[in-house]
Amino acid sequence: MKRFADGVLSTLCYLERNGSYLMLYRNKKKNDVNAGKWIGVGGHFEEGESPEDCVLREVREETGYTLTSYRFRGLVTFVSGDGITEYMSLFTADGFTGEEISCTEGELRWVPKEALPDLPLWEGDRIFLRLLAEDAPFFSLKLVYDGRGGLTETVLDGKRLRKH
């Protein structure tokens, strides 16, 4: 895991097909902060990678797909409340080739976008999924958590949306 100052650099991608996103139910890794949650696919930067390098590699490793059309949608800063800050480059992809493989981190499933609210998601993920659904221009979203999974503050493009 690469660190920037006291932060972790990562990517997350939502692959789109027929009104659905490819979602990953995190149920296979030990000591997984995302255990029991549905998220997109992605992971941590390796030395020398750009956000695009990282998302291409992570999607290929976790899904078997090679992205052919993707878009950098925003930067999400997660302040965990337990001393770790993660800077996540958020992507969507609507073009890819290859055959889906089994993921070592959890169960992959195509989920209709309208069914996403019914899934166990991080509260902050609901916010950036809404921004993606609204086709918001490139954004910077800061999500501050309390260290126990509760969202305490949301800041979009430098403006506080709410203190929870």
Image (cartoon, helix red, strand yellow):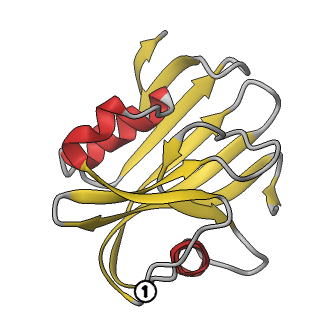
Front-most of residues 155 and 164: 164
Front-most of residues 133 and 64: 64
Vertical relation: 133 (above or below) 37:
below
Residue 144: give x, y in percent of width and height: 60, 25
Residue 59: give x, y in percent of width and height: 52, 74
Which quadrant would residue 148 be assigned to in this image?
top right
Front-most of residues 70 and 7: 70
Quarter holding the N terminus is: bottom right
Residue shown at 81% from the left, 63% from the top: 2
Vertical relation: 156 (above or below) 27:
above
Which quadrant would residue 9 be assigned to in this image?
bottom right
* SS for dot 1: loop
Amino acid type indicated by mark 1: Glu
With 63 as the anchor, is 137 left or right in this view? left
Vertical relation: 55 (above or below) 152:
below
Mark 1, residues whose alpha carbon is within 10 Å: few (<14), some, or many (≥20)?
A: few
Vertical relation: 47 (above or below) 154:
below
Residue 72: give x, y in percent of width and height: 39, 66
**Where does label 1 land, which residue?**
99
